[in-house]
Amino acid sequence: MLPGGLLVLGVFIIAAPELAKDIQNALRKLVFSVEKSVVKKRLWKFTEEEVSDRVALHVCSATKKILCRTYDIQDPKSSPKPADWKYQSGLSAFWLSLECTINVNIHIPLSATSASYELEKNTRNGLTRWAKQIEEGVFLINGQAKEDDAELLEGQKKSSRGNIQHFNVKVLTQLSQSSGHRSTATVQVCSGSINLKGAVKCRAYIHNNKPKIKDAIQALKRDIINTLSDRCEILFEDLLINEAPDKKNSEREYHALPHRVFASIAGSNVMLCDYKFGDETAGEIQESFFEMLDQVVHGEAIHIAEEINTVDINPPVNNTNDMQQIQLTKATLLSKLQQNMGVVIAAAVAVFAVTFSFNYFSD
């Protein structure tokens, strides 16, 4: 649900004072469990400069006293460190918004032995290679390439209090080549392939406190990578749940990737996001936001970008024995989804086409 630039910083619990001792152990486990769940399918890594502390906040239900501690998530044996909890006004009033549209054309080969349940795994491998290109891409902010350590707001007019200042970003990507080494081509025999094509609209936020160019670009890169990865994951889960029992594995199918939906949240100018399929109604979207945020989101606060996206699937053929081995029971599927439960939110909608075809692929 979080667009680029926003992260889960910790967990909190409200409990009676007599449970204080037991709660600290529970909070510690929860901090590390939440972080493990969040990073499980992430295709990018934190930099060494980023803060790795996460917050555990205990609010006493009787006295309203607050106990705040932090843990270093990079160290599984991290001991709690005391931290001050301070209230400040206007923190959500000054946000900078970065937006861009990036054209996607990703070709992922499928070997002759790939089973249908490996489509998600193959797609993830292909997206990992693509994510590296995004990381190494050139980002132009308002049409200009700037130094990483330059200030984002240099030469910009200050926005009025409560308004978000927007920046348009263009992304230039190319196949990465190691300096000093010749590029080599590989030929892979495959019976199918996945093609992701479209124009992905992305958005990221950064706080207005002397932000650097590198911080803004980093936030946008992560949103670009997250949104495409999240959509593919949601699509494959939907296909598994709704797969017809009499469907032939070699049948060609057409599907729509989920759209990104923005929602304005009370008390902040930052918009959170969700994903929807074409047959979901506005009421269902509002219900989804309410379940996650415990906050009513009115219809006029929901923004859905207009787009058409299609998924053309023509998977590799598997023999009978392979088909028997890859049958997933409903119970197994539900167990898998429960282990990976979560809601993804980002910032706009994209145009996609995913194509599965039979061919020989070289790169």
Image (cartoon, rainbow, N blue to C red):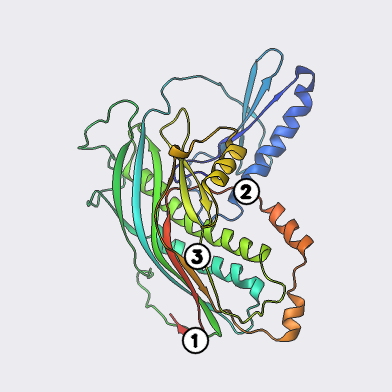
Identity of the residue drawn at 43% across and 82% down: 185
Q: Pinpoint residue 109: horizontal percent, then vertical percent.
A: 52, 78
| Residue kind at label 3, given as amino acid type | Leu
Image quadrant holding the C terminus, namely bottom left
- Residue extending furthest top? 63
Identity of the residue drawn at 21% across and 33% down: 157
| Residue kind at label 2, given as amino acid type | Gly
Of tags 3 and 1, which is closer to the observer? 1
Of the image marks 3 and 1, the number of the one nearer the N terminus:
3
Q: Point out which mark residue 304 bears.
A: none
Identity of the residue drawn at 75% across and 32% down: 25
- Which residue corresponds to mark 1? 359
- Which residue corresponds to mark 3? 127
Position above or below: 133 against 362: above
Which structural element holds mark 1? loop
| Residue kind at label 1, given as amino acid type | Asn
**Is residue 275 left or right of 93 when viewed as pictured?**
right
Of the image marks 3 and 2, the number of the one nearer the N terminus:
3
**Is residue 194 left or right of 241 when viewed as pictured?**
left
Identity of the residue drawn at 62% across and 66% down: 239
Whole-number angstrom distance, CA of label 2 to CA of label 1: 36 Å
Q: Pinpoint residue 299: horizontal percent, then vertical percent.
A: 47, 39
Mark 3 and 2 residues: CB-CB less than 8 Å, in contact?
A: no
Which structural element holds mark 2? loop
- Circle 2 Cα neighbour tier, 10 Å, few/some/many (<14 / 14–19 / ≥20): few
- Circle 3 Cα neighbour tier, 10 Å, few/some/many (<14 / 14–19 / ≥20): many
Whole-number angstrom distance, CA of label 3 to CA of label 2: 20 Å
Of tags 3 and 2, which is closer to the observer? 2
- State the residue in front, 5 or 182: 5
- Circle 1 Cα neighbour tier, 10 Å, few/some/many (<14 / 14–19 / ≥20): some
**Is residue 234 left or right of 240 when viewed as pictured?**
left
- Which residue corresponds to mark 2? 342
